[in-house]
Amino acid sequence: MKRYTYYILALLMSLASCGDTEYEYSNRRCYFIFENTGSRSPALASATNIMSPGIFCRVTTSGENYYSFSTNQGLTDRVARTEIDKQRTVELGVYNETGIMVGFGNLNNPATFYAYDSQCPNCYKNTNLPRYQLSMNTDGTAECGSCHRKYDMNNGGIVVSGDGGDKLIRYRANTTGPQGVLSVTN
């Protein structure tokens, strides 16, 4: 009888965990590796500094030979791709043109490093059209110009204003610091 009780409990626990779950990371493809040695991009360096939580940087491609970096604090730069950069595959989220947003959130200690898609997840989900690039605000939120939802980049990308819905599309990411390597992969 004990053996059957164990199996019944195991089955009940597995069923209880199969609810309406929202996964932390997207299953969408994203791949970007960038070596910021010598602070090639001061904008990216500011967002990958754990001592500067709340600064987020949008990463986009600018033609075949450049990357563009811009922060929610107004710092922008454009960096030429090295030969090593050109050999790497680059896939910046749902729509390669609008890019990804990376940075340390300011709510946890130690700070959590986040990487989000730059598309509004709810508008993209409703239309399947990749034309809803989010704007980044200085307070660490991202806002959609179409549906007017606001997302908190410091708090896992949850909706904080506007109609409810999905949180930001999040990718696995890590950084070795402002003059190190940024890696965003899924």
Image (tube, rainbow, N blue to C red):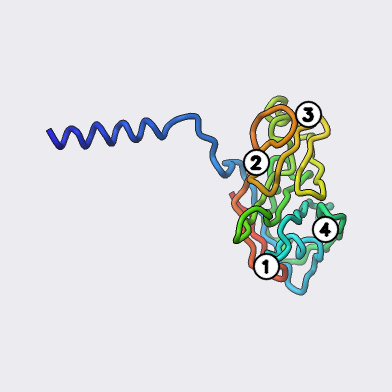
Splitting the image into 4 quarters, where does residue 152 fall? top right
Label 3 or label 4, whichever comes before in sequence order: 4
Q: Position of residue 134 (x, y in %)?
A: 79, 40
Give the CA distance from mark 3 to mark 4: 31 Å
User: What residue is pinned by disc 3?
Assistant: 147
User: What residue is pinned by disc 2?
Assistant: 169
Task: Decide which of 144, 172 is in the foreground and name it.
Answer: 144
Relative to 54, 76 lies left or right: right
User: What residue is pinned by disc 4?
Assistant: 66
Give the CA distance from mark 4 to mark 2: 24 Å
Viewer-side label of 4, 2: 2
At label 1, counting other C-alpha atoms closer than 10 Å, the crowd grade (few under 14, some 14-19, many 20 or more) is some
Relative to 138, 48 lies left or right: left
* Dot 2: element: loop
Label 1 or label 2, whichever comes before in sequence order: 2
At label 3, counting other C-alpha atoms closer than 10 Å, the crowd grade (few under 14, some 14-19, many 20 or more) is few
Task: Decide which of 110, 10 is in the foreground and name it.
Answer: 110
Q: Position of residue 56 (x, y in %)?
A: 75, 54
Q: Are marks 1 and 3 in contact (CB under 8 Å)?
A: no
* Dot 4: element: strand
User: Residue lying farthest bottom?
Assistant: 38
At label 2, counting other C-alpha atoms closer than 10 Å, the crowd grade (few under 14, some 14-19, many 20 or more) is many
- Which residue type carries mark 1? Gly
Number of callouts in the render? 4
Quadrant showing the N terminus: top left
- Which residue type carries mark 4? Tyr
Splitting the image into 4 quarters, where does residue 164 fall? top right
Q: Are marks 4 and 2 in contact (CB under 8 Å)?
A: no
Label 4 or label 2, whichever comes before in sequence order: 4
User: What residue is pinned by disc 1?
Assistant: 177
